[in-house]
Image (cartoon, helix red, strand yellow):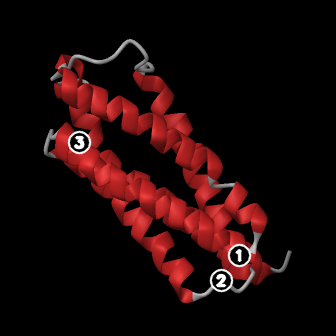
Amino acid sequence: MKKHSIFLAILFILLSLSAGFIGSFFTFDSISTWYQTLNKPFFSPPNWVFGPVWTTLYILIGISAYLAYESKAGSPAMRIFGLQLILNALWSILFFGLKNPTLAFIELILLWISIAYMIKLFYKYDRLSAYLLIPYILWVTFAGVLNLSIALLN
């Protein structure tokens, strides 16, 4: 791998991780306060699970975007990559920052659609880049069920 390629791969990973970093500003204070007071479904994982899962997913998203970019994915694919990162960070703002699970769930539907579309676009250029996004869409699907359950229970 060339120096240029390594730099780009790291850049895409850091860009992806930045969505989680932005979201964490709104999450940390609420986890030990507001979130603890919510009624949660029986399948809600312990809080410590979310950090490692999201970190892994952001790394996979970054690698996926890098592979698609290197395979000459066009600007529509890169725009949807950027859009889903914005939607990803926005979810934390809505759920934890505004403490609005219902609005966060509605926004999560848009996030899910953007991820599905990104998978479709990336698949045209590099199949591995699309396959690397499967854990992401599966986790967001689970997060959607969890988010909806919390909205309904509260």
In this view, the residue in front, 67 or 148, is 148
Question: Which residue has dot 2 on it?
Answer: 73
- Residue 116 percent location from the top left of the image: 53, 59
- Residue 33 percent location from the top left of the image: 18, 24
Regarding mark 2 in the picture, which secondary structure is present there?
loop
Question: Which residue has dot 3 on it?
Answer: 95
How far is disc 3 from disc 2 in space, using C-alphas? Answer: 32 Å
Sequence-first tag of 1 and 2:
2
Q: Residue at x 61, y 54 (%)?
A: 59
Q: Residue at x 61, y 73 (%)?
A: 121
The N terminus is located in which quarter?
Answer: bottom right
> 7 left or right of 114?
right
Is the C-beta separation of discs 1 and 2 under 8 Å? yes
Is the C-beta separation of discs 3 and 2 under 8 Å? no
In this view, the residue in front, 85 or 26, is 85
* Circle 1: residue type: Lys
- Residue 98 percent location from the top left of the image: 13, 45
Q: Residue at x 38, y 39 (%)?
A: 144
Q: Residue furthest top?
A: 42
Q: Is residue 78 above or below residue 46?
A: below
Residue 71 falls in image quadrant: bottom right
In this view, the residue in front, 55 or 133, is 133
- Residue 11 percent location from the top left of the image: 59, 72
Label for residue 124?
Answer: 1
* Circle 3: residue type: Phe
> 84 left or right of 107?
right
Q: Residue furthest right?
A: 1
